[in-house]
Image (cartoon, grey):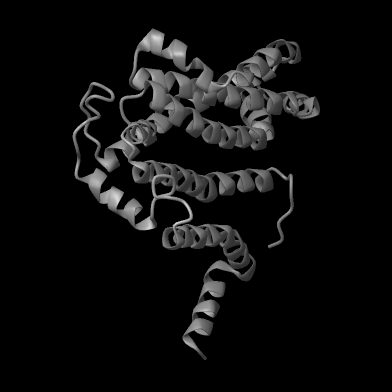
Amino acid sequence: MSVLQAASIGLQKRFGRQRLRKILLGSIPFAVLLVMWQMNTSMEWLPPVYIPPIGTIWEAIYTLSEGCAGAGAVLSMQYECLFTNHILSSLGRVGLSLVIGIPSGIALGVLAGMSRRFAHALEPIGVFANAISGIAWVPLAIVWFGTGWLTTLFILLNTVFWLIFFNTLLGVRGVPRVYENSVMTMGGNRWAIITQVYIPGALPSIVTGVRMSMGFGWRALIAAEMIGGDSGLGFMIFVSAAEYKIEEVFLGVLVIAIMWMITDRLLLIPLERWTIQRWGMVWRPD
């Protein structure tokens, strides 16, 4: 048995044949992009100012990790451009917005969905708020809060809260009232109805809202950091583009995409699949 065959069997035992096949199929487009990227570097189809070589991306990691002077004439300020600081700053904003937005969105969505008349009255507000892109709030947020943490947090909360609230409201409103009546018949109080009927019944919709809010939140965060931020990956991309450091721009874009893919694949998709299977929407054989 060759080493390649042994490695293939080992991977199949660890991940499963179906899962390994999905991983390999999903890796094909990225492999093609990397090959085309390397070919562009070798053949020089496009100059490095448009698409930098892959090697310069790795060099940018070390350059940013050493710290450097600020944009100076470009932004008239000094900043410490440690790569890890920008990543942690963006993650901190996302984490804080989720800690505030998810519980408040779920709580208010459940309260609004408990009354059908109240839910119908508030549903247009949810549609209206979700129709306004988080980026559209950037100019007003800068006027209200200036540049910095409050501006980006305000924009993120607008994105996260309304998506969670709207999906929770729709999920609770879609729970059949026969379950509520059954709990009340058996002597259950309002708290029992909320914890045993509304939230479990709306959980698939809630998790979908969480997944959507994180996806749209990342986009709003990067735009907010570019325009009204003073740190973070979006700020790094904006400053690097102003200084024509295209390799740092590519690095920031790649890091954003990789971080979101890891979060989505390792956390959100398993959570969504578990909630759907847990509450009887699909059947999974043992």
Front position in the image: 157 or 67 = 67
Instruction: Locate residue 40 relative to residue 273 in the image: left or right.
Output: left
Residue at position x 54%, y 36% in the image: 215
Residue at position x 75%, y 27% in the image: 174
Front position in the image: 240 or 2 = 240
Most distant residue in the bottom direction: 1
Compared with residue 276, is residue 55 higher up or lower down, i.e. above or below?
A: below
Quarter in which the C terminus is drawn: bottom right
Instruction: Locate residue 94 relative to residue 123 in the image: left or right.
Output: left
Where is residue 11? Give x, y as percent.
52, 73
Q: Is residue 204 visible?
A: yes
Compared with residue 71, is residue 88 higher up or lower down, i.e. above or below?
A: below
Residue at position x 21%, y 33% in the image: 80
Front position in the image: 2 or 231 = 231
Where is residue 226? Give x, y as percent.
40, 27
Compared with residue 147, is residue 261 higher up or lower down, i.e. above or below?
A: below
Where is residue 46? Give x, y as percent.
46, 51
State which quadrant residue 23 falls in. bottom right
State which quadrant residue 130 falls in. top right
Front position in the image: 80 or 108 = 80
Where is residue 142? Give x, y as percent.
40, 13
Q: Is residue 187 visible?
A: no
